[in-house]
Image: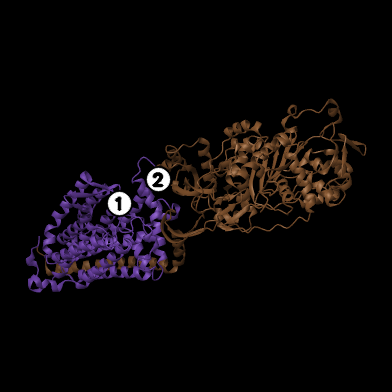
Chain colours: A brown, B purple
Amino acid sequence: MKKSARDITDSNRAINRRALMLGAIQAAVVATLGWRLKTMQLDRADEFRMLSDGNSIKLRLLPPARGLIHDRNGVLLAGNEANYRATITREEAGDPELVLARLRQLIPMTDTAVEAVLTEIGKRSAITPVVVADRLSWEQFASIAVNAPALPGVTPESGLSRSYPRRGDFAHVLGYVGPVSDYDLSRIEDPDPVLMLPEFQLGKLGVEARLEERLRGKAGTRRVEVNSAGREMRELERVEGQQGDTVQITIDAALQNFAVQRLGEESAAAVVIDVQNGDILASASAPTFDPNLFVRGISGPDYRALMEHDHRPLADKTVQGVYPPGSTFKMVPLLAGLDSGLIDAGTRFYCPGHVTVAGRRFHCWSRGGHGSVTAVASLERSCDVYYYELAQKVGADRMAEMARRLGIGVRHDLPMSAIAEGIAPDRAWKRARHDQEWQVGDSINASIGQGYVLASPLQLAVMTARVATGREIAPRLVRAVNGVAVPETAFPELGLNEAHLRIARAGMDAVMNGNHGTALRSRILTPEWRMAGKTGTSQVRNITAAERARGVISNDQLPWNRRDHALFVCYAPVDAPRYAVSVVVEHGGGGGSVAAPIGRDILLFALAGGLPPLDAYPPGQRGGIEEMRARMNLTPPPAPQANGRARA
Amino acid sequence: MSGYLDYKSEQTPIGWRKILYLSWPLVFLLVAVAATGFLMLYSIAGGRAEVWAEPQMERFAVGMVAMIALAFVPVWFWRSISVAAYVVCVLLLVAVDVFGHHAMGAQRWLDVGPVKLQPSEITKIALVLVLAAYYDWLDLNRVSRPLWVLIPVLLILIPTGLVLAQPDLGTSVMLVAGGGLMMFAAGVSLWYFAAVIGGGAGLVFAVLKSRGTDWQLIHDYQYRRIDTFLDPGSDPLGAGYNITQAQIALGSGGWSGRGFMQGTQSRLNFLPEKHTDFIFTSLAEEFGFVGSITLLSLYTLILAFCLYSALTNRDRFASLLTLGIAGTFFLYFAVNMGMVMGLMPVVGAPLPLVSYGGTQLMILLMAFGIVQSAHVNRPR
């Protein structure tokens, strides 16, 4: 088709008109785009910049590794172990139920656990990770990581968790850590933000709680870029945290282990103190429990079993438990009498087996009586009437004052939980506490460690150490922090006459080694380890006149919780004291028959630095000792760690 | 059918002299836009050229050579092959629907030996060619007659239907818009456009109404794109993810941007298609308003040169061709930018010359080769 020039001109005119219209439309669109750019990039830039920063840079806390706890020889008592766990975030998971159903094919999860996780997810915000499974094996951890595409929102994480390799041995001394509760946070003013991290562990009891600030360390920080799904893309800056301080405590793990084993299934406590420097070498409370259970979150039935156990495994009987000390208290009235000059070594009291004061009859444990008794013999034979007479002379206030000087009724400050003060009763105390006047009968009861007197095993050990040295020994539990030794304090003199102290010590020596000693059976034959001690049997009930008339009921016939407490305190060697030991066996029976052998065995272990040779024991007992050792399940001492920070 | 003798050959450069008559400003603008793309591809890859920037540069070099080679081809050649090109494209689209390679849930690619062809891209140009030829042939008086309107409508709808079947909503819309633009330029009565816009509105209504019923007209994911467009905040981690993050990236650029290679949004994989459809957000983030308005200006200048070339060209076919190709180019960048700025629903449309992608880049450069050919050989 041939076109004329006119056609072409017409056509061009038409096209040009439309082309210009098109150009105008395009220009309008471009202007709209430009306007939109201006609105977004200039007018609303700050808003978008904030969103961009907010969704890309986050400050994350690096939980610090908790400080380690070692025994006096560097044995690890509390460490940190890798803990593999999986968390889930609702926002990423989409349908948590479906994701959990898939996860269950990889790791075992009970229906209740799934329910609990779902409830927790519902409670938390959509972006808060919730722990789905804790303490996974490496295989389980790896299988979750490998199957990540099928498990949206599930993140396998590895963190540190507290572990107590010596298990029950140090449950009471060290306590344990656990997840931070709302209650914990409410008690802390201005809490460290690291406490808000999920699964962060806080000291709940014992050394872990009392030295929390030192052990916690300082959190590190990471500045990370995350995508809007919360996944980390790049780390911009990392400030490493600081591990908590390494704490070395005074306890000897081997001795502690022996003491716990020796107490066995009894409801009992034993404390060993180094009388030179006050170091607590062992502080055993039985029965014990595995603190690792609490770190992992103890199951309901396990917790109920511990709570309902009549031997109260959760209580630390060494410092929290207070008991009428019974005859182990007798050094107190004796020294009070000597110190006040009311008696001397030669003063005798006659014991007919009982004494009547203010119309009330007080019995000696020996119904036949001890006859004429001196100070040393009063301890050796544990004559009660001697102290009944003495108490009437000395009075309550002097006895209470001496008790406090020797460490009873005084709160010893150690980094342990709920340390009991005990009671050293005097007139003022009774007036304040019971709004009653002190009776002479109260003095008589107090003189044999009954009535109002209450002491913890720790206080009894301190008392023994003070009698043995004549110095104001104060117990201590922390030996070194970060390898720097805590300086030993020079303990001042008690201010007691050395001659008086020697009388008390002679009496305690006679308890073990005298012909009439109440703990003669538990003596140590090895001359350089010769020990001194004092037995005690304290009643936990009143014996009525009617009962007495029927004849004293033997302990075995009573229900367990009405039997006498068995107590024993001792130290050795007698001429150069090194260790003081106290033992309380709740409802254990006689101090001489039950508590003294335990105290002797623990003391011997301390003296020998391990299991002592059998010839330290009286010949007739060696077979029994061997049998007992065979039954014991001692933890072999681990290779000592050269460097305190070997395991992080 | 007109022959080359229609042109006054003495007024038209011939041989190597043609190179002097190329629209060199246009060449310069294309290089500038493509260079922006290389820069962004380098930045997005985290400072590595070998990932995207280098392959893109190689293809651009090949494409530029092809463009200049095509500029030497006389315009009548394009008119001669237009029908054949159109038929071939329709056949290729049928082949894609039958044998095509699946990518991203849709069949768009055709494996031809070592080359992966995306016929829907070529179709856009072929459609422009065939419509330009049609209107060049059609008597001016018949342009708005219903029968003569129906023919180009069918020419547009056949490939559109095939592309929609892939399914590729974005390209379908581009084909309809590109074809409509050609008809508009050719002078078809504005009443037709009014009718189509009215009908389109009705169709949109029907599409929205059909959702969830058993006569549902489009895919669920397409509905979700519509939802996302209407309210990106409704599902910021799901379907609205792209657009929300794109807008954050874009807006956070501010006046001068965060600086080259400093864009946190693109660096952090907030943008899943950051090297292709969402590359503009990276540019806007790193170079701010200054950078994005500069790119928009470059595009506008390209349009302006094409418009100038079309207006000064006395050959109806060449003018229509130039307007059509420039219009297609315009649709590309307007849809892409409108999409990332939240002015339009998310459809898969690359940023022309900047987004990473071989077929798209090559075809655009060859299309500009045709524009150059129209420009060089225009009767003065």
Pick the front one: A244 or B255: A244
Name the residue carrying label 1.
Answer: B169
Q: Mark 2 lies on which chain?
A: A
Residue A324 appears in view: no
Pick the front one: A144 or A45: A144
Mark 2 lies on a secondary structure that is helix
Residue A149 location, x and y as percent? 38, 45
Q: In which quarter of the image is the N terminus of chain A?
A: bottom left
Give the tally of numbered discs.
Answer: 2
Which class describes the residues within 10 Å of circle 1: few (<14), some (14-19), or many (20+)? some
Q: In this view, does A352 lie to the left or right of A179?
A: right
Name the residue carrying label 2.
Answer: A145
Pick the front one: B147 or B323: B323
Residue B203 appears in view: yes
Residue A554 location, x and y as percent? 77, 28
Q: In which quarter of the image is residue B248?
A: bottom left
